[in-house]
Image (spheres, rainbow, N blue to C red):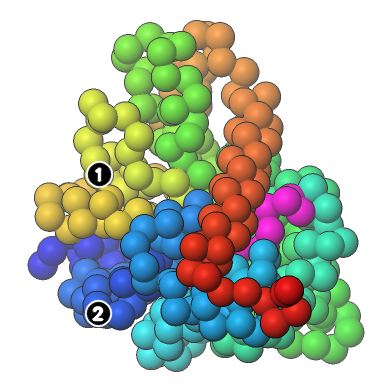
Amino acid sequence: MISTQALHEAGQSLWLDHITRELLVQGTLRHYINDLAVTGLTSNPTIFYQAIQRGEGYDDSIRAGVARGLRGEALFFQLALEDLTGAAALFQPIHQHSGGEDGWVSLEVSPLLAWQPVPTLEQVLTLHARASLPNLFIKIPGTHPCLRAIEEAIFAGVPINVTLLFSPEQYLAAANAYMRGIERRLEDGLSPDVPSVASLFISRWDKAVEGKVPPALRSRLGIAVGQRTYRAYCALRESKRVRHLEAEGAAMQKLLWASTGTKDPNAPDTLYVEALAAPDTINTMPEGTLLAFADHGKVGRMLPRDGGDCEKVIDEFVAAGVDVEALAEQLQREGADSFAKSWNSLMALLADKSEALGVHRPDAR
């Protein structure tokens, strides 16, 4: 049994953090589903920028969209939904077989709205209605202002992937927003079955402290934060509040490991996948990491529910001068800024592509 299948058998879902038109057209995604136990997919502005920038795979769709009068955000979401609709169809059997627990794809709202809950919610509702896909998560950043948008979206019945989480505190805040939305649905006599995942970013922690801590601590902070968050996740799952919601028919918001590609060239390319193996969680990984794990990854001991040695390791980082709480806030701000930068680059790319393809909007003179 290959490692990806073994990890799936151990209870962790493997999702692909990558999408391109070629991945769908050439049958690669179907291969990953059938042969590597991939059961879901995530995307973000950076992924789509890289996909559209590479080659001519989107040219026909760009021509058609511009001819219909689409540009900017409207053109991008048309392209993205074309891809994600195709991917969602491939994952639909998994979605049905798992009773809606797996087989999801994700689309992110504009990262320019990361600190604006009202326009975020408006875009979430619009995209959800436009896509009309039973296995599509809309991604909302877990910034403090957007916790309100998360709660309102869940209350409205929209499945949500909470992104850009970097600490147990940020995770628990997102989980509370999710549960408030579910509790409000129950109060109004609505179905509490509105799935959600919470995405904790891992590798950016180690990138942030690279060269600033002793060599013995290299590539250890992200895993320690993951362990600490997993402990909080397990404790929440066992809480009276969650048990009540589950008894009423709600599904527990699942913890998802994001940013699990190794950024340190001196670290093993399967580092975060092997270290964060845990049942009832999801690991969404870049294509290169997925292939590396399938080739030579190993499934060993599952992540301990008590967090293992995370406190000892984090104490060592604190002793080395790392303010972990402040760094979590910094990483969330930087993550939002990075996606906003990719978004702006994506909009410029679409404008350049449209011009290069010689297509004009119907009202252009």
Residue span colored magenta: 104-114
Q: Judge whether 330 appears above or below 361 on screen.
A: above
Quarter containing the N terminus:
bottom left
Would residue 73 be counted in the magenta stretch? no
Q: Judge whether 144 appears above or below 310 on screen.
A: below
Q: Position of residue 284 (x, y in %)?
A: 41, 58
Q: Position of residue 321 (x, y in %)?
A: 56, 9
Secondary structure under tag 1 reads loop
Q: In front: 40, or 119?
A: 119
Which tag, 1 or 2, sits closer to the chain's start?
2
Instruction: Tell me the tag on residue 225.
Output: none
Q: Amino acid at mark 1?
A: Thr
- Which residue corresponds to the image point at 56% horizontal and 15% vertical from the top-left? 322
Q: In front: 115, or 60?
A: 60
- Residue reaching furthest to the front: 365
Q: Is residue 154 visible?
A: no
Instruction: Tell me the tag on residue 27.
Output: 2
Characterize the local packing of mark 2: few (<14), some (14-19) or many (20 or more) Cα atoms within 10 angstroms: few
- Which residue corresponds to the image point at 31% horizontal and 48% vertical from the top-left? 273
Q: Is residue 56 visible?
A: yes
Quarter containing the C terminus:
bottom right
Q: Judge whether 200 appears above or below 105 on screen.
A: above
- Left/right placement of residue 78 relative to residue 298 reads right
Quarter-wise, where is residue 21 in the image?
A: bottom left
Q: Which residue is mark 1?
A: 270
